[in-house]
Image (cartoon, grey):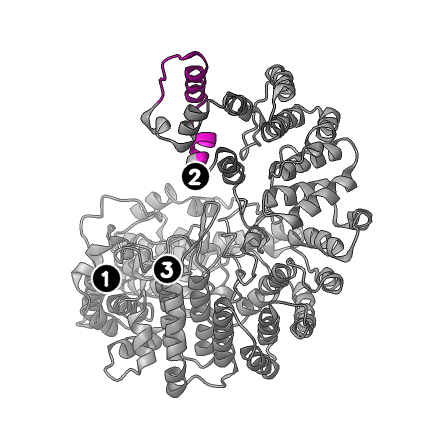
Amino acid sequence: MLATLVLFPYNIIGCGPDADPYDYFTSFFNSNLTENKNLKPFYYTSYRFLYHEQEPVPVKYVTSAEWTGYCGKAVNEKDAYEFVCRYAHKDLSSLYFHLEKKQPLNIPDSVKKNGMAQYFTKSNDLEALGYLMYAKQAEPFVTGDEGWEQVQRDSIKMARLIKNGQQLYAAAKKDFIRLRYAYQVMRLLHYSGRFAECIKWYEETIALNKTASVLHELSLSLNAGAMARTGKRSEAAYVFSKLFAQSNIKKVSNYMSFRFTNYSFEEREKNLQHCRNNEERANMLGLFALGDPYNRIEILKEIYRLSPSSPLLDVLAIREINKIEENYLTPLLRKTEGGKALNLSWNDGKDSVMNVYYKEARELAGFYHSISQHTAVKNKGLYEIGAAYLNYITKNYTDAKALLQSAEKMALSPELKDQWQLTNILLTISAKEKIDAAFEEQILPSVQWLEKKAKTEKAWKADWHEVNLWKQFYRNLMSEILAQRYHAQGDLHKETLAIGAAEKIFTTAMDENAEEYYPYYGIFETSALNFLRYRLNSKQVEQLHSLMQSGTANKFEQYLIKNNTLSADDVKDFAGTAYLREFNLAKAEEWFKTIPAAYYKKDPYKTYMAANPFADLINDTHAPTKQDTVTYSKLSFVQKIRRLEKDASAGTNNEKKAKAYYEIAKGYYNMSYWGNSWMLMAYEWHSMDGLKHDSLMQKWEKEYYGVYKAEEYYKKAFTLGKDNSFKARCLFMAAKCRQKQIAIPQYSQYKEWEQYQRAEEAYRKKIFRNDEYFAALKKDYAGTAFYKEALNTCSYLKDFSVKK
């Protein structure tokens, strides 16, 4: 085995939140459909070198189990493992000197009762016990590096152990023990960097020992590593490939050593020359392809030609499907309007890449169908279902249906039957022209079956991750496939429910009162709640609420409503907010009145009104001020605005009207992005959002960022006001509103720095040099107390006043 190997993912992400390496693309094809489950470390993910790094068969259990044959029936594998791998050197030493020199036995009772300890007590086998003590001494120097921490190897101590081990090897009488001493010495030679000696020692000792043991495979791996270090890289690669194929022992280690012995995919021809038959060639080609994130259909075809029954063919075939999901299906779904991907991906979905993988999907579909007809292929159903799924991805629904019907007649494992059912659900939903009540009733049992699979699956353990594939499949079906179909029909209220149902599957074991239903995401606009708040308008949310409260909802609609992260109060709160965004204050008040106060108390972060939305501030701030002496809710805010509107429209007292208009303007300004009570209109605030361009905004956002309504009311107050200082304040605030309506140039919009500078200069001219409000303010109200206060507070006004 080669020395320290450092692993890096294929995709290096420079910044931003990390994608989950087991859930970063939209998938509906189970990677666990291979018959050989020991190949799980080689399932597909392009974000890691391996799917996971655990060996399928832990070596220590296998090596310790061999002692049961040596010690006899009285020792079981558990006792052997405890004694060989867990007990400390001092306990073994105490037992040794107790047996040899009759010294007091000072060991824990658990060791005394161990079957292997009792074997030594009865047999007085000091040769075997002495070896185990020696192995305990060598172990710290011959283990691999853990993660980023490099093992500190003392070459002087290792040299002493090597010499001692060689002496003990020569003195040992039993081949079983001699083999083990030889193995320990070989490990020490290897990790000391004495590779030529390591090879010679192997040839003169271990290779000649006829004792049946897994140590032969482990030693051969060490010998291959030494060969690679002495220049025989291709020969070493061949040995590693054979070891990988013949055993599940050190499968991951042998694979990694093979890959690091061969620096490039292009070296394969040189290495293949060592192979003696087609099976060996197919296996070596498979090792080249196992960790490759790129399109390798030509390798898959060659492996099939060489060895149709190759155990690697299944896992490689599934990997190719997963690559097509990542590079074609995922960007295709994300470029299609509607739905919401509830995983994080950095795939930019370039058309050129998508076209390559679309063509591969079409080619693979035909190839997999042909494989399914070959008599030497064991897992025929995998390839026929795979062909059907690839046709589904490329929207060739007729062929997909025919292939599923063909696969149904084949001998399918329980896992393949589940994959068949999932593929059939996808095909049924996608091929239907319109999703109506009758169709919803038709698919409900299938969706409930998928939900049950998701809730009852046993999660995989992949290193420190927990993988829930069927939960992902259910979530993806609801949040992307079904949600997109509803979106295409204009049923945004059902689209929202589909996304909420998708989220719900991951909340089963979580606290329903938690702030975030899916805290892993941490991404803006991923939850059903954010989808509701930022994608629906007042009409659509009314439609959603009506359905949720309806006594006539069909069974599928009832299912969506029941299995959802959205509550009725969530919907009511947004309904009121949606009408507030549209300045329909009567409807907003109507909705806010229906929401219990406990809704906000339970989770104050849904809308916190710590600031006074009617505070009169020269500078924008979200920090507390002395004016924040009154606490408002959404309801009380709307009610005050409505009272002010009545005051502004009643009577003939213009001064009173002007003040009412000014109060309304303050409220509307402060509920904007720039104000202290932005949460009246929005639910999240991000520091860069204010730089958005109008073309990126929804209608309500244009008001939220542009404060047009506030400007309108400041102008009304100015027109009716009499006091010059008051009028100056109105003009100044109107100027602030006007400034917010001019998009700030972004460097990313321009190819050259000079272009950006010119745009920046033009922006500065617009924002204050030619500001009509500032001009009137300086011309007519420069003598007011407010003007002097603003001049010393606002840098824009000061710059304007001196034409800076």
Q: Amino acid at mark 1?
A: Lys
x, y percent for residue 135: 54, 25
Q: Quadrant of residue 455?
A: bottom left
Task: Tell me the SS state at disc 1.
Answer: helix
Q: Residues within 10 Å of mark 2 (few under 14, many from 20)?
A: some
Quarter of the figure with the N terminus: top right
Q: Residue at x 69, y 43 (%)?
A: 240
Which badge, 2 or 1, is on the more N-terminal residue? Answer: 2
Q: Which residues are magenta?
A: 80-107
Q: Using the numbered discs, state the Cα–Cα distance from disc 2 to disc 1 in whole angstroms.
A: 71 Å
Amino acid type at circle 2 is Asn
Secondary structure mostly seen in magenta is helix
Q: Secondary structure at mark 2?
A: loop
Q: Tell which circle, 1 or 3, labels the residue nearer the N-terminal end.
A: 3
The local crowd at label 3, few if under 14, some if 14 to 19, many if 20 or more residues have their Cα within 10 Å, is some
Q: Is residue 8 above or below residue 131?
A: below
Q: Is residue 85 magenta?
A: yes
| Residue on which disc 3 sits | 506
Mark nearer the viewer, 2 or 1: 2
